[in-house]
Structures are given as C-alpha cells and as structure tokens.
Amino acid sequence: MSSADVLGTWTWDGTSAVTTPSVTLRSGGEVEGHDGCNPMSGTWRLDAQRVVRLDALAATSYASCTQDGQQTAVQQLHDTRSLVLAGDRLEARDASGRTIATLTRADS
C-alpha cells in the first residue's frame, strides 16, 4: 500500500446519522473530516507498517449531536487512531487496534 491508495474522501458505513461522517486524506498529510455534526482537521501519515496514523485531530463544536446514530458515529470518528486498507474499504481502529467502523471510498 502507498499513500496514493488511500487519498480521497471516505465515508462511514452503516451509520444512521443524518449527515454521514467522512474523512478526506489529502496529499501532503492533511486530513479533513466531518463527524456528522462538526468539521474536524488534522494530519495523517503512513507508518512503517503501512497503516494510516491520524495525528493532531481537532474538531470545532458548532452543533450538538442528539440522535443515537449520530452520537455513535461521532464517538467512532473521535476514537479512531488509525485506518487500515482492507480490500476496497478502510477499517477505522481505536487506540487498542480494535476495528470500530468501516469506511467506503466516496470519490471513486
């Protein structure tokens, strides 16, 4: 896997959120996203194990998320520490390496 394999916009699978959470990995190591309520940004890098590491994510709190599906998606996005390419999807993993969500490429 190279960084070119993961560039672009990816959306959360199976969410009942009103606005689908997403992340966009840009060349140069910038990441932008939306947790379904609020925008977020930060940096990403591809480590020696070919895992996308998300660094220094910051979110702006413009809106409160009140729906259950939205809350789950928001929590998953904020808990994501790495992304692993698995076929044509990305697996979002938490700090312990547990898969907490899958993402599909939105801009294919």
Image: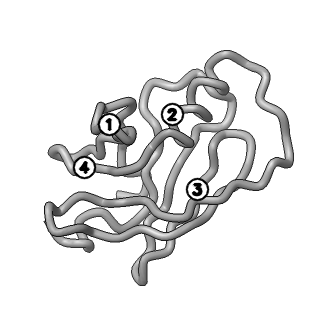
CA–CA distance in space, label 4 to label 2: 15 Å
Q: Name the residue type under label 4.
A: Val
Comparing marks 3 and 2, which lies closer to the viewer? 2
Residue 49 disc label:
none
In the drawing, does residue 48 fall left or right of residue 69? left
Query: Within 10 angstroms of label 3, few (less than 14), some, or many (20 or more) residues?
Result: many
Q: Residue at x 66, y 39 (%)?
A: 36
CA–CA distance in space, label 2 to label 1: 13 Å
Q: Of label 1 and label 3, which has the lower sequence position? A: 3
In the drawing, does residue 54 fall left or right of residue 77? left
Q: Of label 4 and label 1, which has the lower sequence position? A: 4
Query: Within 10 angstroms of label 1, few (less than 14), some, or many (20 or more) residues?
Result: few
In the drawing, does residue 24 fall left or right of residue 18? left
Instruction: Please name the residue that numbered disc 1 is placed on.
Output: 96
Instruction: Please name the residue that numbered disc 4 is placed on.
Output: 84
Instruction: Please name the residue that numbered disc 2 is placed on.
Output: 76
Q: Name the residue type under label 2.
A: Gln
Q: Residue at x 53, y 48 (%)?
A: 22
Q: Of label 4 and label 2, which has the lower sequence position? A: 2
Q: Secondary structure beneath disc 3?
A: strand
Vertical arrangement, residue 74 with respect to residue 47, above or below: above
Q: Residue at x 21, y 47 (%)?
A: 88
> Residue 91 placed where, x, y %?
30, 41
Instruction: Please name the residue that numbered disc 3 is placed on.
Output: 33
Q: Name the residue type under label 1.
A: Ser
CA–CA distance in space, label 4 to label 1: 13 Å
> Residue 94 placed where, x, y %?
39, 38
Q: Are marks 4 and 3 in contact (CB under 8 Å)?
A: no
